């Protein structure tokens, strides 16, 4: 029976993937608010819209991971489009620019992506009060930065974080992500400001956090400490820690708990 249920789930995703509408958008139309040291690095969006009659009004901006050095943009980005479309959710995958030590570059890209989704709400069948952000690893740090720092049209209504880098503090942070985001020489004030567990308030949006117990790339305490602070500030949050899986699995079907994870995400998204 379980195998039949899994097969039906996969067939449903495949069936509605063909009904979605997909297109690319230049995030800044060639004029970014914050210049990058790499003028060949261009921020883009790939938009996956569900069939209009299935659209719920919900949208999610997706930030792939890659240590703020590159982007795992397929299994932590584009491959999520069909799954979310089956839920009637618009998926907007952000190809953000690398910081090279200037953290304002990816932050400005992510905030612009949130604003652009809301600006196109009518055309994309999106509810401006139901726009979330999703991030993986370093992309989870970017997503949680937007969730804890951004305001107005750039603030997400919910957040989904996979094996996220949360802290920039020595002993907890992922060093490569830290150095690429803040630069090799930084201040304790900057490290604290972008340790997002320390930036949680009662106004932080609700969260879903997904981890594996055996992650040896990003210390799992990043996500656990973030959940603890959300709980302490009365922010609705859910934390799933799978027994194995390591780091960086995204939506790869080779992840042992792939189906369980998708069902848990689907259930959480339906809980509010």
Image (cartoon, helix red, strand yellow):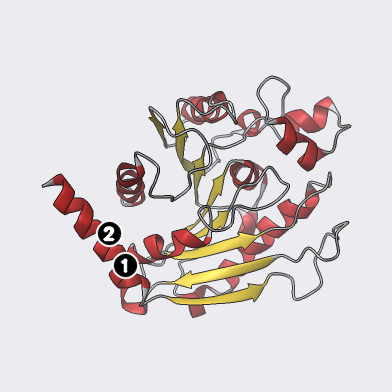
Question: Could you tell me if residue 129 is visible in this image?
Answer: no
Q: Nearer the viewer, residue 176 or 191?
A: 176
- Image-quadrant location for residue 168: top right
Q: Position of residue 1 (x, y in %)?
A: 10, 47
The foreground one among 73 and 102 is: 73
Give the spatial CA distance, label 2 vs label 1.
6 Å
Q: Relative to residue 192, is residue 65 depicted above or below?
A: below
| Residue ID at (32%, 71%) | 16
User: Mark 1 and mark 2 in contact (Cβ < 8 Å)?
Assistant: yes
Report the residue that reaches farthest toward the top. 171
Left of 73 or right of it: where is 48? left
Image x and y of residue 121, in percent: 51, 73
Identify residue for label 2.
10
Where on the picture, by quarter, is residue 184? Answer: top right
Q: Is residue 218 left or right of residue 91?
A: right
Number of callouts in the render? Answer: 2
Which secondary structure lies at badge 2? helix
Residue 169 relative to residue 186: left or right: left
The relative height of residue 31 versus residue 242 in the rendered view (above or below) is below
Q: Is residue 88 above or below residue 264?
A: below
Seen as rendered, the residue at the extreme front is 254
Left or right, 254 with reference to 180: left
Say the numbered circle drawn on residue 14: 1
């Amino acid at each position: 029976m379980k195998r039949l249920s899994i097969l039906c789930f996969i067939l449903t995703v495949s069936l509605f993937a063909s009904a979605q509408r997909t297109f690319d958008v230049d995030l800044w139309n060639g004029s970014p608010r914050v210049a990058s040291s790499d003028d060949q690095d261009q921020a883009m969006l790939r938009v996956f819209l569900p069939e209009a009659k299935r659209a719920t009004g919900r949208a999610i901006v997706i930030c792939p991971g890659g240590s703020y050095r590159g982007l795992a943009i397929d299994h932590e980005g584009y491959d999520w489009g069909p799954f979310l479309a089956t839920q009637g959710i618009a998926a907007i995958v952000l190809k953000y620019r690398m910081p090279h030590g200037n953290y304002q570059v990816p932050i400005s890209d992510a905030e612009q992506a949130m604003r652009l989704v809301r600006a196109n709400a009518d055309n994309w069948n999106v509810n401006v009060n139901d726009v979330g952000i999703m991030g993986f690893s370093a992309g989870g740090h970017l997503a949680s930065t937007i969730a804890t720092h951004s305001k107005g049209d750039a603030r997400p209504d919910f957040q989904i974080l996979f094996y996220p880098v949360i802290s920039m503090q020595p002993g907890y942070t992922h060093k490569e992500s830290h150095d690429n985001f803040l630069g090799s020489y930084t201040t304790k004030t900057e490290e604290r400001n972008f340790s997002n567990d320390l930036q949680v308030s009662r106004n932080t949006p609700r969260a879903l956090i997904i981890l594996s117990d055996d992650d040896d790339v990003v210390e799992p305490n990043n996500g656990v400490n973030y959940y603890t602070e959300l709980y302490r500030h009365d922010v609705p949050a859910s934390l799933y820690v799978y027994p194995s899986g390591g780091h960086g699995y995204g939506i790869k079907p080779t992840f042992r708990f792939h189906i369980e994870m998708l069902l848990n995400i689907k259930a959480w998204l339906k809980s509010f």
